[in-house]
Image (cartoon, helix red, strand yellow):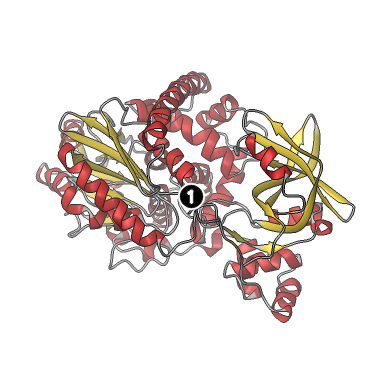
């Protein structure tokens, strides 16, 4: 029997605790409840969260290895050595290479940038990349968003006379590479307080520490926070702690960026001269930068982020936009095939493989399958006797831990709680699938069924006004680790019923007590209009938002769940 989704109301403050937050943090009572439920229970904590400042960031010199890294980079700058930069082919890696490239050029250096080819080299520092940088005369190699597990490749670089500074944010496995310095907050011996920085965040910390040592000015580095925001958002890093500060500051700078490449991207994405939020980067900017690396060579994306030519920037932006359209067509074909293969299967972790799938886009499709099923998904592109896989997960099932449990079946793996990659032999896929599903089943037995919701606060329709929306917007940027608040109103009715909207949406006007608001349920299927019509009175879980259309702006309820009128468990 199918389990019904559970709606749970988050634990709220007492009247006294709520009053203290309202008075001392100067927030709306409903915003105070959201803050309290998310752990910001002391007025000072709430004020800091609502007013993030760069002054709140920890000193990058607290990071293990930072002093050695700064000393080695300074020596290279002082003596005119050639510095090589190597980063991952995704947005995080590309933006991190661009950030350090811009910093080093301001310091008088001409670095040699190198990104791997996804199709021929795969992820991380390779022997081929080391040899290329050696031929280019690099005396120092700085890796970004990779390298912490590339022990043999770093050793090869050292043997060829290249010193290495590794900057990464992935989980180390065993011994660290034999580099001059390894900057990674996830090192067991690293005292840096925030472990959630993206790769571009670590690169920013290195640039900041170099500036503090006498190279460059802080104001110039702050102008590159637009790159930090883009990379952090695209890497799906949690928007808490320092990431929240960096992204909030970076989004403001991105909207007014003077970088020709980012400005051209905003224009082709239809985002120029608009306020920018998490979604604008995640769905507008990130995919276009990613498109080149997904389909093979990421070099055009790096050139876009580093060029000073407006004409070249526009040319590259249009090129990436075309590649992104090509990538979307591949996504849709693979998604259709993958969805057909799991139709009728017992729900659970998804592991699928095919020799017909492009390795550069399977991560996107894995995300879509995860959203469709509410379960982690691994898609594997087979090439002969081996396959390269991309995995995406749900909250409560950390992928890096699950893959560690399957390490004897994998040739290579790495990643985070919500996203990871792997390499596997074809004959190991089925046993991997069985173990992966078993691991998820154990976790799922302790979790709520798909579609369950954590409600931040219960409201009345009379609460839903512009003032509340503005107060909730103070909690932005929303994203992983800081989701948009979900509110609940009970005993509502649909004025004039439910109607089909667009290809797959349902719209209606929800009301009670003389107050009515437009509501929209996205991607639920038109059949829901008839099903919900039988409810009579209903409870609605929603996010309050502003709908701008035809030059007008109106409040709207973005539906997250709907059920017959009932109490909350």
- Inspect this view and state whether residue 105 appears: no
Most distant residue in the right direction: 514
Instruction: Give residue 303's position: percent from left, percent from top.
Output: 40, 28
The quarter in which the C terminus is drawn is: bottom right
Instruction: Give residue 60's position: percent from left, percent from top.
Output: 40, 60
Query: Which residue lies at the image location 22% right of the left edge and 57% below the top edge?
Result: 173
Judge from the rendering whether residue 369 lies leftward or rightward of residue 152; answer left or right. Answer: right
Residue underneath mark 1: 217
Q: Please tell me which residue lies in front, 277 or 341.
A: 341
- Inspect this view and state whether residue 529 appears: yes
Quarter occupied by residue 365: top left
Callout 1: SS: loop
Judge from the rendering whether residue 333 lies leftward or rightward of residue 53; answer left or right. Answer: left
Quarter occupied by residue 373: top left
Instruction: Give residue 100's position: percent from left, percent from top.
Output: 38, 42
Q: Residues within 10 Å of mark 1 (few under 14, many from 20)?
A: some
Looking at the picture, does residue 39 appear above or below residue 344?
below
Instruction: Give residue 143's position: percent from left, percent from top.
Output: 29, 45
Looking at the picture, does residue 3 appear above or below residue 314?
below
Most distant residue in the left direction: 159
Query: Which residue lies at the image location 57% right of the left edge and 54% below the top edge?
Result: 483
Judge from the rendering whether residue 101 lies leftward or rightward of residue 21; answer left or right. Answer: left
Query: Which residue lies at the image location 30% right of the left edge and 58% below the top edge?
Result: 401
């Amino acid at each position: 029997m199918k389990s019904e989704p559970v709606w749970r109301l988050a634990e709220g403050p007492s009247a006294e605790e709520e009053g203290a937050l309202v008075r001392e943090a100067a927030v709306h009572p409903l915003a105070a409840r959201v803050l309290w439920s998310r752990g910001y229970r002391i007025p000072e904590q709430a004020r800091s969260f609502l007013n993030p400042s760069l002054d709140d960031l920890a000193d990058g010199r607290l990071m293990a290895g930072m002093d050695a890294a700064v000393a080695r980079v300074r020596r290279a700058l002082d003596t005119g050595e050639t510095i090589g930069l190597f980063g991952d082919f995704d947005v995080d890696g590309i933006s991190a290479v661009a950030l350090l490239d811009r910093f080093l050029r301001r310091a008088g250096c001409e670095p040699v940038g190198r990104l791997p080819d996804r199709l021929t080299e795969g992820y991380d520092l390779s022997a081929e990349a080391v040899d290329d940088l050696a031929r280019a005369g690099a005396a120092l190699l700085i890796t970004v968003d990779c390298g912490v597990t590339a022990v043999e490749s770093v050793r090869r670089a050292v043997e060829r006379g290249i010193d290495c500074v590794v900057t990464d944010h992935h989980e180390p496995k065993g011994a660290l590479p034999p580099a001059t310095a390894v900057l990674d907050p996830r090192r067991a011996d690293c005292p840096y307080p925030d472990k959630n920085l993206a790769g571009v965040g670590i690169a920013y910390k290195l640039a900041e520490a170099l500036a503090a040592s006498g190279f460059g000015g802080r104001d110039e580095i702050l102008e590159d926070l637009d790159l930090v925001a883009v990379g952090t958002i695209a890497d799906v890093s949690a928007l808490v702690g320092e990431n929240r500060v960096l992204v909030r500051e970076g989004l403001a700078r991105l909207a007014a960026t003077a970088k020709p490449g980012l400005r051209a991207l905003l224009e082709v994405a239809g985002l120029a001269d608009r306020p920018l939020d998490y979604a604008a980067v995640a769905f507008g900017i990130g995919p276009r930068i990613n498109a080149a690396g997904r389909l093979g060579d990421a070099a055009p994306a790096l050139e876009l982020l580093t060029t000073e030519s407006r004409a070249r920037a526009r040319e590259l932006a249009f090129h990436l936009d075309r590649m992104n359209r090509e990538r979307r067509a591949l996504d849709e074909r693979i998604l259709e095939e993958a969805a057909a293969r799991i139709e009728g299967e017992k729900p659970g972790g998804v592991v699928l493989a095919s020799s017909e799938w492009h390795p550069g886009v399977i991560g996107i499709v894995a995300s879509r399958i995860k959203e469709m099923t509410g379960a982690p998904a691994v898609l594997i592109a087979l090439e002969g006797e081996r396959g390269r896989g991309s995995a995406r997960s749900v909250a409560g099932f950390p992928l890096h831990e699950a893959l560690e449990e399957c390490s004897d079946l994998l040739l290579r793996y790495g990643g985070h709680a919500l996203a990871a990659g792997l390499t596997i032999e074809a004959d190991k896929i089925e046993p991997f699938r069985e173990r992966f599903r078993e691991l998820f089943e154990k976790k799922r037995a302790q979790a709520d069924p798909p579609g369950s919701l954590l409600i931040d606060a219960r409201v009345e329709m009379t609460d839903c006004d512009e003032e509340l929306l503005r107060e909730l917007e103070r909690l932005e940027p929303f994203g992983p680790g800081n989701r948009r608040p979900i509110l609940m109103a009970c005993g509502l009715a649909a004025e004039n019923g439910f109607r089909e909207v667009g290809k797959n949406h349902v719209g209606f006007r929800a009301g009670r007590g003389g107050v009515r608001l437009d509501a929209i349920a996205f991607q639920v299927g038109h059949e829901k209009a008839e099903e919900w019509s039988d409810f009579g009175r209903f409870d609605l879980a929603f996010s309050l938002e502003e709908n701008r259309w035809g030059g007008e702006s109106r409040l709207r309820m973005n539906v997250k769940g709907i059920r017959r009128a009932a109490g909350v468990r």
